[in-house]
Amino acid sequence: MFQRSVIQGCGAYLPARIVTNQDLAQRIDTSDEWIRERTGIVQRHIAAEGELTSDLALAAAQEALKDARVSADEIDLIVCATSTPDQTFPATATRVQALLGITKGAAFDVQAVCSGFVYALAVADNFLRCGQARNALVIGAETFSRILDWSDRGTCVLFGDGAGAVVLTASPEDGSASQRGILSTHLYSDGRYNDALYVDGGPSSTQTAGFLRMHGREVFRHAVVKMAEAIDAALDKTGLQPSDVDWLVPHQANIRIIEAMAKRLDLPRERVVVTVDRHANTSAASIPLALAEAKADGRLKQGDVVLLEAMGGGFTWGSAILRW
Ligand code: UT7
């Protein structure tokens, strides 16, 4: 029997320390006005010293399990999207697995930078649909503060730390149009754009972790075009119209990019889940953080059509449509 993956629960974790635009303006040549106007960001959360990506991931995963009413021993797959792992290896997902007391199934990381959560969701969805796992934890967790060059105002004001997680459960296809679950995933990459957004270090090249480097304007230009492509592919595949979309839950990099996508779908602002003002860009964590917020405050109702889209370093980009 064909299986469908259903999001049963969501969890989120944000480090306690908040750094505002004004705080940054005291340290570098920037202003609250510039950051708000160009990005929509007002503040970001920054992990405490010694607080690891896996600690953030674990907290979000525990909340997602509770929300889904699924126990850790029912989980047989953990996919963690991160570009800021605790260690080069083993995978951050395996530390989360150990801390949850899980000793069965598979746990591994997926690295697609800001598209990471859409990639991880697609991977887990495929495992569930082909019967290789039954209950997956899909996590996006990042501590980008550790790879920021805090003297580069063009990048350091844009990112924050955080984690979000969902529990994905396999459920037999019942053939009804109203059945909950993931309806489509589309993933893309084009490695020719490596130099537009990258980290200038790594174990094989410099034996250092390196710092994030970005040509913001170029990334912006591609983001708008590429995410529109991914959205079109999702609508085509599912036979849905833009007017069928109840919620856009986009990667949160820049309010101007988010607004461009909403405009393309002709979606009013109140149908777009926005967290970039408070979280900044948390890379792979931004979509599950936004999902967790919209579920917790009751915005997402059973049966709603939810569209996810993201674009990041690589370039990588993608989309997913689900019926909530
Ligand atoms: O999540 C992965 C995908 N990432 C993205 O989607 C990010 C996409 N890019 C962007 O969001 C935008 O390009 C940025 C927010 C990064 C930059 O906005 P922009 O409107 O493209 O600005 P810009 O880079 O063209 O810079 C404009 C000016 C420059 O000054 P000049 O050369 O015009 O005199 C910058 O030096 O703004 C200056 N600038 C700043 N000024 C104050 C750059 N950063 C800052 C800053 N504070 N923090």
Image: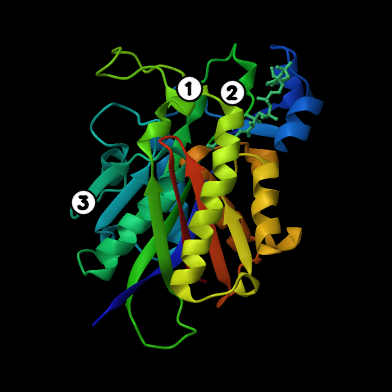
Q: Which residue is labeled 2 in the image?
A: 155
Horizontal and vertical percent position of residue 251: 55, 47
Which element carries disc 1, helix, strand or loop? strand
Q: Amino acid at mark 1?
A: Leu
Q: Are marks 1 and 2 in contact (CB under 8 Å)?
A: yes
Q: Which residue is labeled 1 in the image?
A: 212
Residue 106's disc is 3
Task: Answer with the quadrant where ligand 1 appears in the image.
Answer: top right
Q: Amino acid at mark 2?
A: Thr
Instruction: Please report the residue visible at 30 percent of the width from the left and 12 percent of the height from the top.
Output: 206
Q: Quadrant of the N terminus?
A: bottom left
Horizontal and vertical percent position of residue 282: 54, 37
Residue 92's disc is none
Q: Is residue 264 left or right of residue 199?
A: right
The mark that comes first in sequence, 1 or 2, is 2
Q: Is residue 132 left or right of residue 75?
A: left
Which element carries disc 2, helix, strand or loop? helix
Q: Is residue 219 left or right of residue 297?
A: left
